[in-house]
Image: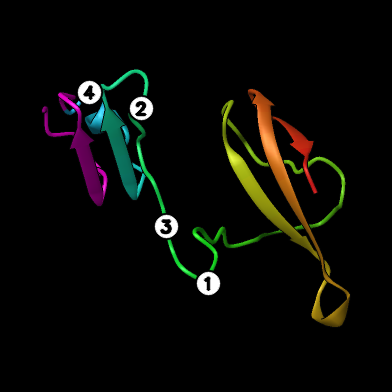
């Protein structure tokens, strides 16, 4: 792996015969996971009992329309609009570069 200016991932998980792949290119990512097993491999699995497996912290936005936030295909995003007791939270999926589809 080549040392890149600006740091690298905080945690890298490698399984199933994978090498570090493009982990060095993921300089701004906190956690990166790789697996080379085609049928059953996953980059990450999260399991809990009685609590959510994953929390996405909402990003404040100034509209409930498609957020003006850059995105790559496959990204998920949670937004929050408003303050206090009148907040609206939405979950988005990026289907095309910088194009968000509202899920909820």
Dominant SS in magenta: loop
Q: Which element type, helix, strand or loop, lies under badge 2? A: loop
Q: Is residue 7 visible?
A: no
Name the residue carrying label 1.
Answer: 50
Query: What is the crowding at mark 4: few (fewer than 14 residues within 10 Å), some, or many (at least 20)?
Result: few
In the image, which residues are magenta?
Answer: 1-19
Q: Which element type, helix, strand or loop, lies under badge 3? A: loop
How far apart are the two marked residues, 4 and 3, measured between alpha carbons? 25 Å
**Marks 2 and 4 in Cβ contact (< 8 Å):** no
Name the residue carrying label 2.
Answer: 40
Precedes in sequence: disc 1 or disc 4: 4
- Front position in the image: 26 or 42: 42
Q: Is residue 57 left or right of residue 15?
A: right
Q: Name the quadrant containing residue 9.
A: top left
Q: Is residue 37 visible?
A: yes
Name the residue carrying label 4.
Answer: 21
Q: Is residue 41 left or right of residue 96?
A: left
Precedes in sequence: disc 4 or disc 3: 4
Picture coordinates of residue 47 (x, y %)? 42, 57
Picture coordinates of residue 103 (x, y %)? 77, 42
Q: Which element type, helix, strand or loop, lies under badge 4? A: loop
Q: Which mark is residue 29?
A: none
Q: Residue at x 36, y 42 (%)?
A: 44
How far apart are the two marked residues, 1 and 3, measured between alpha carbons? 10 Å
- Front position in the image: 63 or 18: 18
């Amino acid at each position: 792996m080549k040392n890149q200016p600006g740091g690298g991932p905080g945690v890298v998980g490698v399984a199933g015969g994978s090498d570090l792949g493009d982990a060095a290119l993921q300089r701004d990512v906190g956690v990166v996971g790789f697996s080379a097993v085609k049928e059953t491999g996953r980059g990450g699995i999260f399991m809990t009992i009685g609590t959510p497996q994953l929390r996405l912290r909402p990003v404040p936005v100034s509209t409930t329309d498609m957020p003006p936030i850059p995105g790559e295909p496959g990204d998920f995003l949670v937004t929050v609009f408003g303050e206090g007791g009148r907040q609206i939270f939405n979950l988005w999926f990026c289907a095309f570069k910088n194009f968000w589809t509202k899920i909820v």
